[in-house]
Image (cartoon, rainbow, N blue to C red):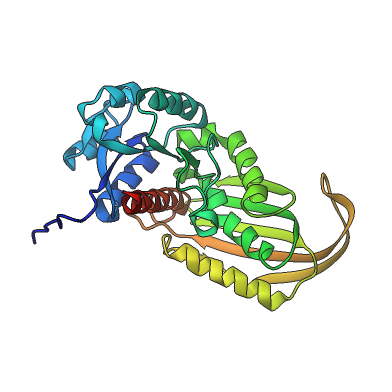
Amino acid sequence: MSHTTSPTAPRPRKAAIIGSGNIGTDLMIKIMRHGGPIEMGVMVGIDPASDGLARAARMGVATTHEGVQGLIAHPDFADIDFVFDATSAAAHVENDAALRRAKPGIRVIDLTPAAIGPYCVPAVNGDAHLDAPNVNMVTCGGQATIPMVAAVSRVARVHYGEIVASIASKSAGPGTRANIDEFTETTSRAIEAVGGAAKGKAIIILNPAEPPLIMRDTVYTLSDEADEDRIAESVQQQVEAMQQYVPGYRLKQRVQFDRVKDLRIPGVGQALSGLKTSIFLEVEGAAHYLPAYAGNLDIMTSAGLNIAQRMARQMAHAA
């Protein structure tokens, strides 16, 4: 079936992806399947033998194995509006600086924990930073759990939020493993800045079990006393918002509540009392490129694409 474009329809915005590993390749396939206002432009890597670059070439996508400088020198760079960076926190700092020098107005979606730009979790603050030149997608654990902290924060003041993200060891590539410290630091800060907790803590577990286990996340909050039904309803609303772009996101069981007294939390307080809320989640990937158990990677690519789509629509509306 052929498709024609209306003369008045906004032009699709072209994107480049830096990082031809698991995340970058999955994102490329998502863009080509349902990118909406986003189209693939260039796939960028540093290993000429990588599967991601080979797959991109087979799918008709322009490629370069010379990193960000190869992208900047590429003849298609002039048409690139968005760059997704799926490398590492350290590499992203250099990549963003190089892109700014070459094309100051370019939009960068940061899929690393570098956090140069504002934190962005689509289901919580997806429309807050659509004009930002660089937005940070926090981490996979952050994308999965911060919406739940925010759900409690909408009902009661959250004094402390703690998340535990458990992912299959096989779904943690070199980039993830190189960024464990940044993962915990960035996620903890985003639990506070986006989730609304006064103090946040993040833990990641790489589970070596065979067969690999699906991504599971646990969220604990300590808040002021509040109506349990209102919190449970707020959580369910956030789950439904997440499922709009991550269909495999779901609650494992009903939200649990406990009243606590004289609880000591280092860095928070010595004799804390209030309502403890426990939320148990799992994230199944869409299996576009990655296995279904790799929900941790799928939620990152889905969140990044969602924000780019929102940005592109805003740009079209403003044009």
Residue 120 visible, this angle: yes
**Vertical side of 147 occupied by 182: above or below:** above
Q: Please, which residue is most extreme toward the left here? A: 2
Please provide percent x and percent y for residue 153.
Answer: 68, 62
Quarter residue 245 falls in: bottom left
Please provide percent x and percent y for residue 201.
Answer: 70, 47
Q: Is residue 97 left or right of residue 57?
A: right
Q: Give the residue at x 74% y 49%.
A: 199
Q: State how many labels appear.
A: 0
Please provide percent x and percent y for residue 92.
Answer: 47, 30
Residue 249 visible, this angle: no
**Vertical side of 260 occupied by 19: above or below:** above
Q: Give the residue at x 26% y 54%.
A: 33
**Vertical side of 13 occupied by 182: above or below:** above
Q: Please, which residue is most extreme toward the front here? A: 319
Q: Please, which residue is most extreme toward the bottom here? A: 229
Q: Give the residue at x 49% y 66%.
A: 241
Q: Nearer the viewer, residue 134 or 277?
A: 134
Q: Is residue 232 left or right of residue 77?
A: right
Please provide percent x and percent y for residue 289.
Answer: 32, 49
Task: For the N terminus, give its image quadrant.
Answer: bottom left
